[in-house]
Image: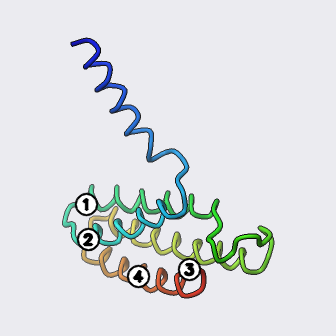
Amino acid sequence: MRKLLIAIVSSTLLCTALPSMAQSLPDDMHVLAGGMKAVQATNDKAEMVSTLTDMRAAAEDAKTHTPDTLAGKANDSTEVQAYHAQLDKLIAQIDVTLKQANTGDLAAAKEEAKKLAAIRNEGHKNFR
């Protein structure tokens, strides 16, 4: 019984620590994609705020990675700087959406969240 309890507590701690650990770029992109769907689907303020917060963290973490199309480019190259600027644009829009969600205006937040798809599509066109 004690071993089972230790296993449960250990796995719970591991699962709660994983979101704070650095992820791969594909993992970050999956968080962003899933978050975009979840934001549009929810009518719960707490869930929307949590999802947007996770999306912001994933976008910030994505800045620490380089997409395959930019492999071998220097961090100060024009292309990598453009990639970071695109992520900054995404983060700024997440912040606008998060601000709306925090006020409780979920309809306005969902409208702002629609702009995230356009930013995503632009980024994929340039860097995927």
Q: Which one is in front in this view, the residue at disc 4 or the one at disc 3?
A: 3
Is 116 displayed left or right of 75 in the figure? left
Looking at the rendering, which quadrant does residue 3 occupy? top left
Q: CA distance from mark 1 to mark 3?
A: 32 Å
Q: Residue 96: x percent and y percent?
A: 44, 72
Element type at mark 1: helix
Q: Amino acid at mark 3?
A: Arg
Disc sitting over residue 20 in the figure: none
Q: Quadrant of the C terminus?
A: bottom right
Check whether the beta carbons of the residues at disc 4 and disc 3 lie within 8 A of each other: no
Residue name at image x 25 percent, y 60 percent = 45
Q: Earlier in the sequence, mark 2 or mark 1?
A: 1
Residue name at image x 44 percent, y 43 percent = 18
Check whether the beta carbons of the residues at disc 2 and disc 1 lie within 8 A of each other: yes
Q: Which one is in front in this view, the residue at disc 3 or the one at disc 2?
A: 3
Q: Residue 4: x percent and y percent?
A: 25, 19
Element type at mark 2: helix
Q: Which one is in front in this view, the residue at disc 4 or the one at disc 2?
A: 4
Q: CA distance from mark 4 to mark 2?
A: 17 Å
Q: CA distance from mark 1 to mark 4?
A: 20 Å
Q: CA distance from mark 2 to mark 1?
A: 7 Å
Disc sitting over residue 117 in the figure: 4
Disc sitting over residue 45 in the figure: 1
Q: Quadrant of the N terminus?
A: top left
Disc sitting over residue 106 in the figure: 2
Q: Residue 29: x percent and y percent?
A: 47, 67
